[in-house]
Amino acid sequence: MTETLEVGDLDLVAALQIAPRAGVRVLADVLGVSTGTISRRMSRLREQHAMRVVGQVPWWIAGDATPHHVWISTLPGRTGPVAEAVAELDEAQFVAATTGRADVYCILHPPRRADATALLVSTLPSIPGVDRTHSEVGLRRYRSGSSWRLIRLGAEQEEALGEHRHGPPPDGPCRLTDEEGGIARVLQRNGRASTAEIARELGMSASTAYRLTQSLLDRGLVQPRVEIEPALLGYPLEAVISLATSAGSMQEIATALSAHPSARYVTTVAGTSSVIHHGLFRHEDDLADFLTRDLGRHSGVTRFEISVVLRVLMRYWTPRGRR
């Protein structure tokens, strides 16, 4: 994909990344255009470029299972079918065909910890075309896709939009009630769903839907985020870099990498790697600079492997590549 969005569309995406649930009037005022222009651009982004606003629920809230990062080597000529089969799994959070460390990289998140064994030992290896797999368990997330954004807007615009942001996710365990869980599932599919739409779908009163929705958002139990292909935003190069580090430097390195402009997703893992950095880059030179300059300054990095993304089939449980 080599096309990029128009300037006005890029501005709208940048605004939505800061305040994904901001109203059309707020977006129009901040960007200095009419509400009709915002509505038309929003529709075009959805229909022509598959932009979605989804609700992210922190995994330590959704259940007792942790995400598993899996690299799959396939038999010759089977990468496409294997990636498509993995993307069909209910547990598939992120799936991409890659080159480098493996042919397919994915993040699989079973609903319960007990389900992980069958998923990794039986379900995944039994997919036709899978040669071998390697999995690592996610430990602590330092950066997520909801945090990465375009830097396009002025300070005053960002400040105005910041008033419509919601709370950060809680650090500790937290469980949702049945009603909250229902609202969270609606927001996972449509992060801009109105409380009236939520009330109708779940059969609850508008006042209850409003109160519980605001509570979920303010407590950071649901985090709306924009999903759109990075290439459309001027970042056609996407790479998953798995790093082995010394034990004492793992947290320091993960924290430092999470602040890097390229960081879309950073997590520590248990396996042959210690840290995974999922980065977005404008050009191969930027990736080369990151590897030699940014990683090079960390003496605790002992080894790294790279998977360059060729085609994304799933992002945060949202199918990609189909319009």
Image (tube, grey):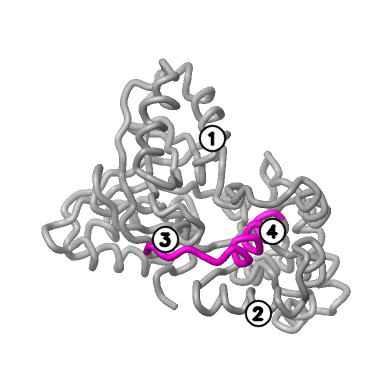
The residue at the far right in this view is 207
CA gap, disc 1 to disc 3? 26 Å
Circle 4 is placed at which residue position? Answer: 15
Mark 4, residues whose alpha carbon is within 10 Å: few (<14), some, or many (≥20)?
many
Question: Which circle marks residue 260 in the picture?
Answer: 1
- Indicate whether 256 appears above or below 16: above
Which mark sits nearer the N-terminus, 4 or 1?
4
Mark 1, residues whose alpha carbon is within 10 Å: few (<14), some, or many (≥20)?
some
- Indicate whether 189 appears above or below 222: below
Circle 3 is placed at which residue position? Answer: 92
CA gap, disc 3 to disc 2? 32 Å
CA gap, disc 2 to disc 1? 33 Å
Q: Which residues are magenta?
A: 1-18
CA gap, disc 2 to disc 4? 15 Å
Image side of residue 217 versus residue 318, left or right: right
User: Residue at 60% across / 66% down in the picture?
Assistant: 9
